Amino acid sequence: MTYIDRPAYLPLLDSYAASPLAKVLTGVRRCGKSSLLKMLRENLVQRGTETSRIIALDFDELENAPLANATALHEYIMARAPIAGPYFVLLDEIQEVDEWERLVSSLIAHGRASIYLTGSNSRLLSSEFGTYLTGRYVGIDVAPLTFREFCSFVRSTRRDLGSETAIFQQYARQGGLPGLFAAPYTDAQTRQILLDTYSSILTRDIITRRQIRSPELFTRVAAFALDNVGNTFSAYRVSQYLKAQGKTLTHQTVADYLEALTEAYVLRKVTRYDVRGHAHLQTQEKYYAGDHGFITGVLGYNASRLPGILENIVQAELRSRGYQVFIGKVGTQEVDFVGVRDDERIYLQVSVTALDPGTYAREMAPLLAIQDSYPKYLLTLDELAGGVDQGIRFMKLPDFLLADGWSQ
């Protein structure tokens, strides 16, 4: 099978090949983690690594179910590990293995294995993993395709989508799951795949694993969050919404559900940041989809959701470039995103259009209220977007996503 390169990840994975640290790739299911491991394996072989020195297992495959506990898997690996010299262990969806932390700790202690793991739950890098391997692993967050990667996949699969505008329209509807390029799916087939992927994550990674007692209510909470991407809401508000529909769920249970969805990367939480006070705020956070294609897959395409989808795309792009992402509070006003990376900062307003003078003034106001010299952008889908006004760059969103850098 031919895989399409993702240059943001493979060089990074290769750079850790000789490292004793466990390399842990996490991200939402179907974002490309398994393919990255397979490409890594191909690279190792092409560079002269003997196949006998590579042990690779995918725990989504039923044939590997007998190995899904630490003892059995350890015996399997030890029986196949070379007597001397380094070797590579590539374990896909490691969270399916009982007590996998003990296994990885043991392999690191042996000192010869270069270990790569993938998982679909952020807890792999928190309490579960940290207890055993503090300081002995590196986490790599694998995301769905960025717009630049999406364009590359379009070219690699020779799909004629026409102009850049047409490609972006498809990206906004379809999202960035690489598997959707496996065949020339119709829009209806694409939506069904997205819905099936989403439903599988909810069932396998959350409802079953966490023993959710009310799957129907849990699914409603998840759908509410997707339908409110880009909007501020609280667990209490969701609880009240369900109550109005004759469903009872405490706001604490709703909060637990949202946490579970975030841990499985179905949602991404963005907290607020006081730009003037340089303080992180713990209220009025927003949630975005782990892949914006889930919004269309679950709810169907509706133009009223486009503002949230555009915000979803922008916050994901910021993350992909190593920025921490916040919602900015500027006095009584709000700027859509503040991106922070080391000593860099960037401020962004996102709107479907800003050609109307009233809309333009409203979108510009929060940016103009920020009194520092960091880059500030107003991003829209307007074909005529361009230029600089009072230090603020007015830019077409797809061009922003394809830009190599954002300094002004």
Image (cartoon, rainbow, N blue to C red):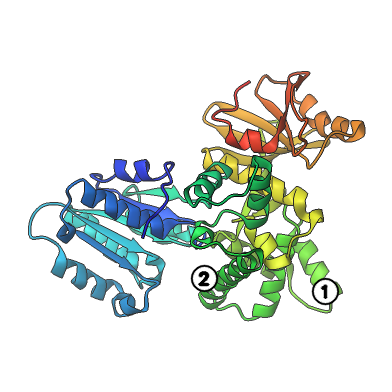
Q: Is residue 131 left or right of residue 255?
A: left
Quadrant in the picture for residue 350: top right
Q: Between residues 340 and 377, which one lies in front from this camera angle?
A: 377
Q: Is residue 307 above or below residue 395?
A: below
Q: Is residue 324 left or right of residue 73?
A: right
Q: Where residue 209 sits: x, y (%)?
A: 50, 75
Instruction: Report the amino acid beneath label 1.
Output: Lys
How many numbered marks, from 0 up? 2
**Furthest residue toward right:** 358
Q: Is residue 26 left or right of residue 357?
A: left
Q: Residue at x 73, y 71 (%)?
A: 250
- Check contact, mark 1 vs mark 2: CB within 8 A: no
The circle drawn on residue 205 is 2
Q: Is residue 282 visible?
A: no
Q: Residue at x 82, y 68 (%)?
A: 241
Helix, strand or loop at disc 1? helix
The quadrant of the picture occupied by the N terminus is bottom left
Q: Residue at x 54, y 49 (%)?
A: 154
- Per the image, the residue denoted by label 1 is 243
Helix, strand or loop at disc 2? helix
**Furthest residue toward left:** 83
Q: Earlier in the sequence, mark 1 or mark 2?
A: 2
Q: Residue at x 59, y 49 (%)?
A: 160
Instruction: Report the amino acid beneath label 2.
Output: Asp
Q: Between residues 307 and 238, which one lies in front from this camera angle?
A: 307
How many residues crowd mark 2 within 10 Å: few (<14), some (14–19), many (20+)?
Answer: many
Disc 1/disc 2 C-alpha distance (Å) = 27 Å
Q: Where residue 201 sits: x, y (%)?
A: 55, 69
Q: Between residues 180 and 310, which one lies in front from this camera angle?
A: 180
